[in-house]
Amino acid sequence: MNHPVDYYEPVLTIGTVAKKIDVSVQTIRLYEQEGLVIPFKTDSGRRMYSMHDLDRLFCIRKMIAEDRMNLQGIKRILSFVPCWEFKGGLDKDCLNCPAYYEAEGPCWSLRNKGEKCILEDCRTCEVYRLDFHCDKIKKIIFGHERPQNETKDKNQTE
Ligand code: SF4
């Protein structure tokens, strides 16, 4: 999906984000501690969020409120994203990276990341910037959507 450039610009305060998704500021901080979202931090340490972060947080709320998932389950789902495919493929460095062999959480939340990622700013990485919508979880993980004709066939038989 093409987004306007400012989709990734950190323009929302934590208070605004909390209000939009109807949770407390502490809850947003908890999601950060759990590695589900990476806020931009200003020089003074103030947390700021983009529209992409907001979409991510909406999806997290949906998974919790409607799908009855807990934070550990959401982290586990995110751990299945094959980040190495965005970092030049599965090489020796990736094979030794916890993002490849562990399922504790999204790659950016792990300690002892591989050499390719250790100096990267995960917030600006294309893996973190994947379109994060609840109806696209499989696309995020497997990289493809259901073909149009299959969707049509299914609709015709319903
Ligand atoms: S740079 Fe960060 S977000 Fe990107 S693949 Fe590496 S650990 Fe994951």
Image (tube, rainbow, N blue to C red):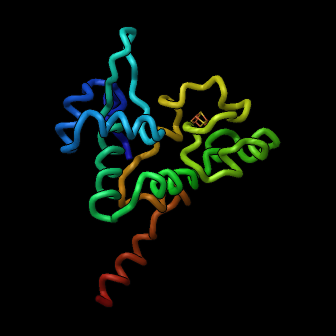
Residue at the extreme top of the image, as rendered: 43
Residue at 65% of width from left, 45% of height from top?
A: 99
Q: Nearer the viewer, residue 52 or 21?
A: 21
Which quadrant holds the C terminus?
bottom left
**Above or below, comparing residue 141 to residue 33 in the picture:** below
The image quarter in which residue 65 lies: bottom left
Q: Position of residue 30 (x, y in %)?
A: 38, 38
Residue 87 placement (x, y as % from top left): 66, 39
Residue 20 picture location, percent across and down: 18, 40
Q: Position of residue 107 (x, y in %)?
A: 59, 42
Camera-side residue of 155 and 21? 21
Residue that lies at the very extreme toward the right in this rendered image: 92
Residue at 33 percent across and 17 percent down: it is: 46
Q: Is residue 63 above or below residue 18?
A: below
Along the line of sight, which residue is nearer the eye, 130 or 61? 61
| Left or right position of 20 against 142 | left
Left or right of 158: which side holds 129? right
Ligand 1 sits in quadrant? top right
Q: Residue at x 55, y 60 (%)?
A: 142
Q: Residue at x 47, y 58 (%)?
A: 73
Count all numbered tags in the image, as a single digit. Answer: 0
Q: In the depicted view, which residue is nearer to us: 111 or 157? A: 111
Compared to residue 139, the image places residue 20 above or below, namely above
Q: Is residue 107 above or below residue 117?
A: below
